[in-house]
């Protein structure tokens, strides 16, 4: 009896081994190209995921562009790319554009970010600003030319402002949150725009009188060059700066979730589905490694279930 049971168990074990080998072989045989574009904020996570995925699937080429959230959605809704990185939810007009091209999609939340308002490391006067003062600096109708225009006692030195470009989801979120309305940003000689967050970092790092904003990971990577401004919401939640804790619990004024959007049609390609699943399985660890705040484990599981 025990001999027969042992034989049956051996057969079952052998069958399972063959099945696992077949699945591993299928995974190893993944081939193709996956093109991703969009948010510079989400880029560090997606690039890290692509790098790790490439170690397991050497015949799948994953390219990650940085044209901004708006730029990514333009390409995504035209059917040009499989996945769009986004630092804000898709807009109504973008939804309409996707629908016109029969592009359906799955939205996946990948991490939390806190847009960081940064100043030069030698700035000793603007360590804490109110939400009203930020609006005073960045608003479309701003009259601020010098730091003294922001607050009495600040230096009478020309203020230099660095901002993500208008295709950026970070630009959209910040402008609406701080100025109260989308596209309500100043656009004059005081301000420099760039879709590349590294350009913004370097601009602030090289100018004592500069201020700007970008995703939290870029601040974490450049702490030695910059200071993060503590934001006072004027007796609402008090003065709070960006940190893993204040971003995760939403206490920081500029906290937000960030996303990827995966084309439903592209998910039919085994390599794209495998990449999206890999992203949700490893996104928590990798988002933390590059400086963002991971979701709770249960949230990644719920996102993963959307891909079955």
Image (tube, rainbow, N blue to C red):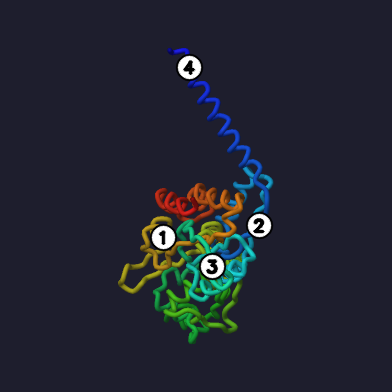
Q: Residue furthest left?
A: 235
Disc nearer the start of the sequence (1/3)? 3
Mark 4 nearby-residue class (10 Å; few <14, some 14–19, many ≥20): few
Give the secondary structure at mark 1. Answer: helix
Q: Nearer the viewer, mark 3 or mark 2?
A: 2
Residue marked by disc 2: 63
Q: What is the C-alpha distance between the residues marked 3 and 4?
A: 71 Å
Residue marked by disc 1: 247
Q: Nearer the viewer, mark 1 or mark 3?
A: 1
Callouts 3 and 2 close, C-beta under 8 Å: no
Q: What is the C-alpha distance between the residues marked 2 and 1?
A: 29 Å
Disc nearer the start of the sequence (3/4)? 4
Disc nearer the start of the sequence (2/4)? 4
Callouts 3 and 4 close, C-beta under 8 Å: no
Give the secondary structure at mark 2. Answer: strand
Q: Residue at x 41, y 70 (%)?
A: 128
Q: Can you tell which mark lies on residue 96?
A: none
Looking at the image, is 25 positioned above or below residue 220? above
Disc nearer the start of the sequence (2/1)? 2
Q: What is the C-alpha distance between the residues marked 1 and 3?
A: 22 Å
Mark 3 nearby-residue class (10 Å; few <14, some 14–19, many ≥20): many
Q: Nearer the viewer, residue 123 or 107?
A: 107
Q: Nearer the viewer, residue 153 or 231?
A: 231
Mark 2 nearby-residue class (10 Å; few <14, some 14–19, many ≥20): some
Q: Can you tell which mark lies on residue 6?
A: 4
Disc nearer the start of the sequence (3/2)? 2
Q: What is the C-alpha distance between the residues marked 1 and 4?
A: 55 Å
Residue marked by disc 3: 120
Residue 49 spot, x, y in % from top left: 57, 51
């Amino acid at each position: 009896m025990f001999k027969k049971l042992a034989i049956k168990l051996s057969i079952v074990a052998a069958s399972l081994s063959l099945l696992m080998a077949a699945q591993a072989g299928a995974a190893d045989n993944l081939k193709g190209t996956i093109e991703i574009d969009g948010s510079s904020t989400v880029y560090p996570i997606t690039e890290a995921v692509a790098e790790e995925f490439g170690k397991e699937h050497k015949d799948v080429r994953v390219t990650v562009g940085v044209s901004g959230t708006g730029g990514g959605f333009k390409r995504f809704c035209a059917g040009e790319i499989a996945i769009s990185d986004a630092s804000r939810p898709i807009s109504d007009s973008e939804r309409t554009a996707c629908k016109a091209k029969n592009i359906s999609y799955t939205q996946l939340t990948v991490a939390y970010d806190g847009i960081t308002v940064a100043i030069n490391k030698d700035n000793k006067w603007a360590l804490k600003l109110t939400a009203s003062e930020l609006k005073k600096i960045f608003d479309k109708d701003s009259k601020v030319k010098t730091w003294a225009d922001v607050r009495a006692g600040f230096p009478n030195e020309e203020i230099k402002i660095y901002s993500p470009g208008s295709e950026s989801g970070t630009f959209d979120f910040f402008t609406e949150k701080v100025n109260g309305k989308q596209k309500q940003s100043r656009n004059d000689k005081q301000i420099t725009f760039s879709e590349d967050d590294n350009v913004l970092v370097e601009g602030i790092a090289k100018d004592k009188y500069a201020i700007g904003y970008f995703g939290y990971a870029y601040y974490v990577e450049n702490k030695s060059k910059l200071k993060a401004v503590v934001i006072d919401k004027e007796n609402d939640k008090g003065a709070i700066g960006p940190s893993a804790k204040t971003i995760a619990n939403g206490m920081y004024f500029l906290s937000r979730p960030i996303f990827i959007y995966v084309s439903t049609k592209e998910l039919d390609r085994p390599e794209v589905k495998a990449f999206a699943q890999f992203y949700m399985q490893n996104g928590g660890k990798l988002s933390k490694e590059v400086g963002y705040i991971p979701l709770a484990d249960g949230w990644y599981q719920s996102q993963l279930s959307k891909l079955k």
